[in-house]
Image: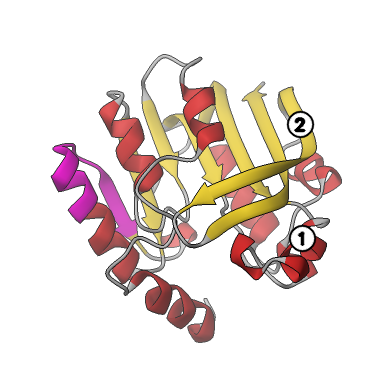
Amino acid sequence: MDNDWLQMWNTRFGKEEYAYGTEPNQYLKKQLKHLKPGSILFPAEGEGRNAVYAALLKWQVSAFDISEAGKLKAIKLAEQKQVSIDYKIGELPQLDFQPSQFDAIALIYAHFPPNIRSRYHKLLSSYLKTGGVIIFEGFSKAHLEYKKNNPKIGGPGNLDYLFSIEELKSDFKDYEILELKQTTIELNEGDGHVGTGSVIRFVGKKK
């Protein structure tokens, strides 16, 4: 993983305040209501707001990120909420997750670098049980225009880091698509996501 990429996230998460707040992502919150708690993985989980929320709902939660600063704040939040999460630091291929380990995987603004993204998506898919569910929300390629008009909305400033429906269909081929759409939403997540942005939302069930 690029050292500049790691440094950026450690700097962002190294501040006292939570960059994206401590409340869960609203799309994730809505989707988890439809699922029976089981085992769930949160890739690129940052400061832990979504993982901790799932743990409060009695999910068995695993998470990972490259940022040690993010993990420290995630564990602090979990302790405040009196829940437990298993949070690993490192790059996905070295983290020893197992095939068919999880009932659900939640990719919430997990904008991996483009040179590894498809490989990571396919590896993550292998960790999901047959019948398991992917929950995804991330900024679309149309988001750059929104970010140019309002930098407070956040998100990558490089088109290659943003998502298209076609790319998601390619990376998650063996899924029943329950929802897949590009839409404009209002975000209010800490100081990091504030305002109008363009996202892709995807819920898929592994065949």
Residue at the outermost bottom position = 4
What amino acid type is highlighted by mark number 1?
Tyr
Q: Which tag, 2 or 1, sits closer to the chain's start? A: 1
Cα distance in 3D space between marks 2 and 1: 21 Å
Vertical order, 42 against 119 (above or below)? above
Q: Quadrant of the C terminus?
A: top right
Dot 2: element: strand
| Residue tagged 2 | 180
Image point 86% across, 44% down: which residue?
A: 166
In the picture, measured across the screen, residue 11 lies left or right of residue 112, that is left
Residue under pointer 1 = 146
Q: Does the magenta run of residues contain 28?
A: no
Crowd tier of the residue under label 2, counting other residues whose Cα lies within 10 Å: few below 14, some 14–19, many 20 or above: some
Residue 161, relative to residue 186: is it above or below?
Answer: below
Q: Quick check: 202 above or below 122?
A: above
Disc 1, SS: helix
Callout 2, which amino acid? Leu
Q: Residue drawn at (36%, 41%), measured in percent from left and top?
A: 51
Looking at this view, is 149 or 204 the one in front? 149
* Coordinates of residue 66 in the picture (x, y in percent): 41, 67
- Which residue is at 52% across, 24% downward? 30
Q: Position of residue 71 (x, y in %)?
A: 29, 61
Q: Quadrant of residue 177?
A: top right
Residue 122 visible to an observer of this rendering: no
Q: Identify the magenta region.
A: 76-88
Image vertical order of residue 3 relative to residue 124, above or below? below
Q: Can residue 61 be seen at all in this image of the molecule?
A: yes
- Residue 117 spot, x, y in % from top left: 66, 59
